[in-house]
Image (spheres, helix red, strand yellow):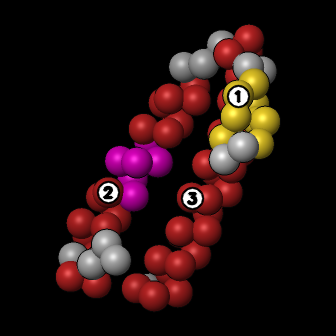
Amino acid sequence: YAEADKRTIQSLIDEFIAVRQASITLFGSFSDEALLRMGKASGNTISVRALGYLTSGHQMHHQRVFEERYL
């Protein structure tokens, strides 16, 4: 639905790098206390730290898809 097939590989790589770096910067800015805060996501209780782990795993999923389809 994102029409990624209409973009250049370089533009996809550039976006991937930018989003990844933004995520690293965001989670790196959180204090230990902030990482332990709990909240709700899709009706489930989850910590900020767990969201960081999920974000990282989701990135690895997208990296595998990219490698399978474009490299």
Look at the image and tell me in which quarter the C terminus lies: bottom left
> Disc 2 or disc 1, which is closer to the eye?
1
Could you tell me which residue is drawn at 58 percent across and 26 percent down?
A: 28
Q: Is residue 8 magenta?
A: no
Across and down, in percent, residue 58 comes to 61, 59
- Res 43 quadrant in image: top right
Element type where label 1 sits in the image: strand
User: Can you identify the residue that label 3 sits on?
Assistant: 59
Tell me the crowding category of disc 1: few under 14, some 14 to 19, or many 20 or more residues within 10 angstroms, Cα based.
Answer: few
The residue type indicated by label 3 comes to: Gln
Across and down, in percent, residue 48 comes to 69, 30
Residue 69 vertical placement versus 13 (above, below): below
Measure the C-alpha gap from mark 1 to mark 3: 22 Å
Horizontal relation, residue 69 to residue 59: left or right: left
Q: Bounds of the magenta span?
A: 16-21
Could you tell me which residue is drawn at 40 percent across and 85 percent down?
A: 70
Measure the C-alpha gap from mark 2 to mark 1: 29 Å
Label 3 vs 2, first from the N-terminus = 2
Residue 43 vertical placement versus 32 (above, below): below
Horizontal relation, residue 21 to residue 27: left or right: left
Across and down, in percent, residue 9 comes to 28, 76
Q: Can the viewer see residue 8?
A: no
Viewer-proximal residue, 15 or 50? 50
Tell me the crowding category of disc 3: few under 14, some 14 to 19, or many 20 or more residues within 10 angstroms, Cα based.
Answer: some
User: Can you identify the residue that label 2 sits on?
Assistant: 15
Viewer-proximal residue, 67 or 3? 3
Across and down, in percent, residue 13 comes to 34, 64
User: Can you identify the residue that label 1 sits on?
Assistant: 39
Look at the image and tell me in which quarter the N terminus lies: bottom left
